[in-house]
Image (cartoon, rainbow, N blue to C red):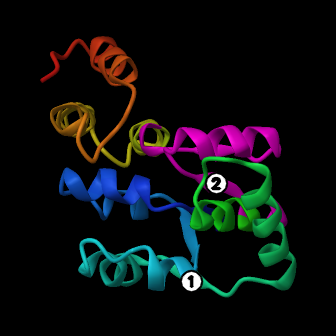
Amino acid sequence: MKYISSDTNVWIDFLEIGELQLPFKLPYTYIMSELTVQDEILNPPELGRTLLSYGLVAVELTTDELILAGKYYAKYRNPYRYDCIALAIAKQRNIVLMTGDKHLRAAAESENVLVIGTIGILDQLYETETISTDEYAEIIKKLQKENGGKVRLPANALAERLEKLGKKGR
C-alpha cells in the first residue's frame, strides 16, 4: 500500500460536496501528523474523527521531520505550520504530498516532493474505474457548484474534464 502525507484542504473539498469517503476507495494510506489531527482539523469538529474512522492514520513526527518542518516554516513565507509538517513528512518518508494549497504546492515543488490534489485524486478514481463516468461528471459538477467558497479549485481544469466527457457544467 502506498502512503500519502495529507494536508487538510483536500478533505475540506470532499467534505463540502458530501463525498468525504471517496479518496479512501483508492489503494492509499493517508497519513497526517497527530498534531495536525488534534489541532487543525477542528472545523467542523467531527471531521477529524470521521477521517480517522475512514482510515486516515495519525502519525507521530520523528525528530528529523520536526526539525525539517521548522526549516520549511522559516524558509517559506506562506505555508502554515501544519502545512510545513505535512511537507516534512512527505520529504522525509519519500512519499506523495496531498494538498491543494498553492503555496504549499510551490514549496513542495522546490523540495522535489510529488503532489496530488483534489482533482488528481478524482482523476485516479475515474481512471481506475473506481467511479463511473456519470459519477465522475456529477462530482465535478458538485465541485464547480461549491467552487469559490471553501472549495478553491482551478475552474478551467474542472470545465476541461467535463468537456472531454461531453457533459455540461454547473
In which quadrant will I find the C terminus? Answer: top left
Please tell me which of labels 1 and 2 falls first in the chain.
Answer: 1
Residue tagged 2: 97
Number of residues whose C-alpha sits closer than 10 Å to that of mark 2, classed few (under 14), some (14–19) or many (20 or more) = many
Q: Is residue 108 visible?
A: yes
| Residue 81 among magenta residues | no
**Residue at 56% across / 83% down in the picture?**
35
Secondary element at tag 1: helix
- Closer-to-camera residue (14/122): 14
- Closer-to-camera residue (43/123): 43
* Left or right, 108 with reference to 63: left
Highlighted range, magenta? 90-119
Q: Is residue 58 positioned above or below 130 on the image? A: below
Q: Is residue 123 positioned above or below 59 on the image? A: above
Q: Tell which tag, 1 or 2, sits nearer the viewer.
A: 1
Q: Please, what is the three-letter code of the amino acid marked with disc 2? A: Leu
Rendering coords of residue 62 (x, y %)? 80, 84
- Closer-to-camera residue (110/27): 110
